[in-house]
Image (spheres, rainbow, N blue to C red):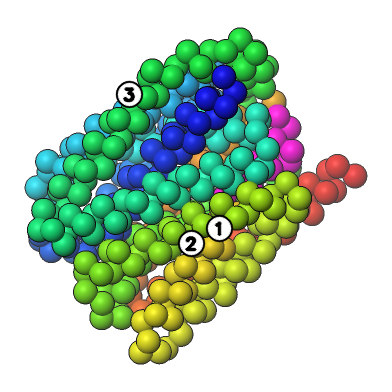
Amino acid sequence: MYLLLLTIIYMAFISLGLPDSLLGSAWPVMYEELNVSMSYAGIITMIISGGTIVTSLLSGRLTRKLGTGLVTALSVMLTAVALFGFSVSNSFILLCLWAIPYGIGAGAVDAALNNYVALHYSSRHMSWLHCFWGVGVTISPFIMSYSLKGGYGWNRGYGFVFIIQIILTVILFISLPLWKDKKTLANSQKDQEKVLSLPQILKIPGVKIVLITFLAYCGLEATTGLWASSYLVEFRGIDAETAARFSSLFYMGITLGRFLSGFIADRFGDKILIRYGIIIIIFGVVFLGLPTENTMVSLIGLIIIGFGCAPVYPSIIHSTPANFGSNNSQSIIGVEMASAYIGTTFMPPLFGLIADKINIGLYPIYLIIFAILILIMSEILNKIVSNQKN
């Protein structure tokens, strides 16, 4: 039962990743067909992230009432419905409307699953599970590239991913009895016993710092993923179909990095993985921004950035019970997810405005600012936690 449930959780993480990279890989084609500005991608991501913020903040109460399994199944179903909506939409307004269930579904499942894994599984499994999220986000751009090159259009690309997502939804509903295993349920109820209000959470030492860290990290990751294709097309002169395929290299770097870091996570610990991951991100951004005619250098830079991102997110989440207490973890992880999605909401569209009004070539500079901020905040958090324990 343990292994079967773990397999289901791995599949759930794939479903988390599937929708995340579709908009960025398709947008160079979408905005021209929809006759809107290139920066309008930020509006859609803001609506999606707004929904995730709300449900992330409510995740502690939702999970306590419904259980992790049902929250996961319902949330994946909502994202599947949203993907179907995208596949049949032909206007920007309709995309904005379908972005609402998209965001609501994503927020609840993210917080619930991450807390469940942080409590019940080792750092190794957290890395590998997020590797499977990377599998989802890596597959999607290839599906979209296939759809664009085959002449099916971006709508059909969303439709293909919808089919995969609805199959995963059915599997999750069938698996619900596994989540109700008595031992697992007892542990889960015990760990989720304490539901804190937002003011109570913010008073805990170090929480504000970790929220800034999450905001900065997700701002960096979301901006990299959303604007990679557009940067390659508009600044590096690569055609849209090729750029859609190459943008997946960033997510491929995340996926490979999380697979490899799973082998060393338990040995080195969360703090070391976070520190060196950020340093690798900075190195990758430098590669991405090198003023050279050789586009291969930029592509290598995207892979390096993804590789550096790999351990950061899962390690910060996995360290939450250790940093702040397992009884507080569901509430704190919910707020961490909300802060992360604030970064996802506002940072990519902010860069969209910079790209529109100034130059999309500022993309690497924008990314490196966030990378340095993450490094500073994570080191401050380490000192606060160390002082609390001493």
**Mark closest to the chain's N terminus, 3 or 2:** 3
Q: Farthest top residue?
A: 182
The residue type indicated by label 2 comes to Gly
Residue 253: mark in rendering: 2
Which class describes the residues within 10 Å of circle 3: few (<14), some (14-19), or many (20+)?
A: few
- Residue denoted by label 1: 257
The residue type indicated by label 3 comes to Val
Q: Secondary structure at mark 3?
A: helix
Residue at image location 65% in from the left, 44% down from the top? 124
Q: Quadrant of the C terminus?
A: top right
Give the image location of residue 257, x and y in percent: 55, 58
- Which SS type dominates the magenta stretch? helix
> How far is mark 2 from mark 1, CA to CA?
6 Å
Residue 357: mark in rendering: none
Give the image location of residue 152, x and y in percent: 11, 53
Give the image location of residue 251, x and y in percent: 43, 58
Magenta stretch: give its range: 313-326
